Amino acid sequence: MRTVRTVAELRSALGAARGAGRTVGLVPTMGGFHAGHLSLMRAAGKENDVVVVSLFVNPAQFGPGEDLDSYPRDEAADAALAEAEAVDLLFAPSADEVYPAGFSTRVTVSGLTDVLDGDPERRGAAHFAGVTTVVAKLLNMVGPDAAYFGQKDAQQALVIQRMARDLDLPARIEVRPTVREPDGLALSSRNAYLEPLERERALSLSRALAAAEATVGGGERSAGPLLAAAHAELERAGVEPEYLELRSATDLSPVERVNGSTLLAVAARVGRARLIDNTVLGDHPGGKPPGDPPRQSSSGDPSRKERI
Ligand code: AMP
């Protein structure tokens, strides 16, 4: 695996592969790698000849008072994990490389970014503008055939899919299931902020989602009882959600009844960590529900070799 830091190096490293007609998969990340990131690298490796992972803690998606300065950063550890997943190129640019002096363009997706995390009372639409701007740039820098995102950030995945469709970006946007700890906690770089007792309380998010699923499993379809079952789990742990909402899993419009694919999304602060989680009720296009957490696996595909 090679680490490159400039767009020029990146393009020259990819030139030969592209000339030979090899396909390229991109996994955009902010580092702090865990099994969720590694599952995306593995998916990219299965479906493409060359895998590029970008590692960039994007200042544009952090609001004032958020954790930009304390965000977990350990490039050497991340590079070792990526290499073990047979990643070919780690693209780790500086902020100046991504946002040179005079940078003045924003890519925004309206509508989808006004609710849930985009609500002005929460992270706000500016957070998603930071995400869509950097992802549009990464897609242009790398020019991948496919880019891989996690269902853990369900709203982000929908926003990026909409951006790619609206702007006719040629990459396929692939969304992969949330990877969880055996006890159900969704993996997140921000779990590193949790003290042991907070980690126990953080489990209430996935338990809340599982309680709603169990209620749906019992035949209930209306929002009230589902949300009540979920709220009860959060309350038991003394966790006050920023939001706990049922929305269409395709356009995020509010729903009163589970009908087809319905997203149940939750956000809550636990200690220093702001955590999010979600599940799709009705069917499970985004993967297994938190009540039945998939096990982590770790090894890369040993048959893949350095290709560039
Ligand atoms: P981040 O480094 O947090 O920006 O995440 C990079 C990518 O990994 C995003 O597409 C996330 O949705 C995805 N991701 C983060 N956590 C998980 C998880 N637990 N399972 C699957 N994907 C994840």
Image (cartoon, rainbow, N blue to C red):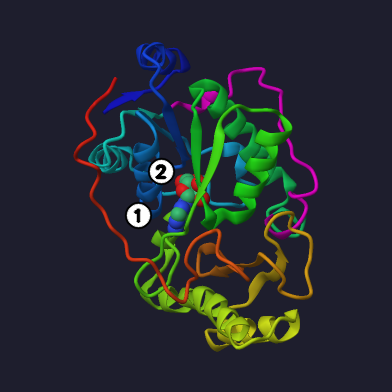
Relative image position of residue 262 (x, y in whole percent):
67, 66
Q: Which residues are magenta?
A: 93-117
Left or right of 176? Residue 104 is right
Residue receiving disc 2:
31
- The residue located at (36%, 67%) in the rendering is 181
- Label 1 residue near ligand 1, CB within 8 Å: yes
Q: Is residue 12 magenta?
A: no
* Looking at the image, residue 289 lies above or below residue 221: above
- What amino acid does circle 2 point to? Gly
Callout 1 crowding tier (Cα within 10 Å): few <14, some 14–19, many ≥20: some
Residue 69 seen in render: no
* Magenta stretch: dominant secondary structure: loop
Residue receiving disc 1:
35
* Looking at the image, residue 6 lies above or below residue 131: above
Circles 1 and 2, Cβ within 8 Å, touching? The answer is no
- What amino acid does circle 1 point to? Ala
- Label 2 residue near ligand 1, CB within 8 Å: yes
Q: In which quadrant is the N terminus drawn?
A: top left
* Looking at the image, residue 134 lies above or below residue 287: above
Question: Tag 1's secondary structure?
Answer: helix
- The residue located at (22%, 30%) in the rendering is 305
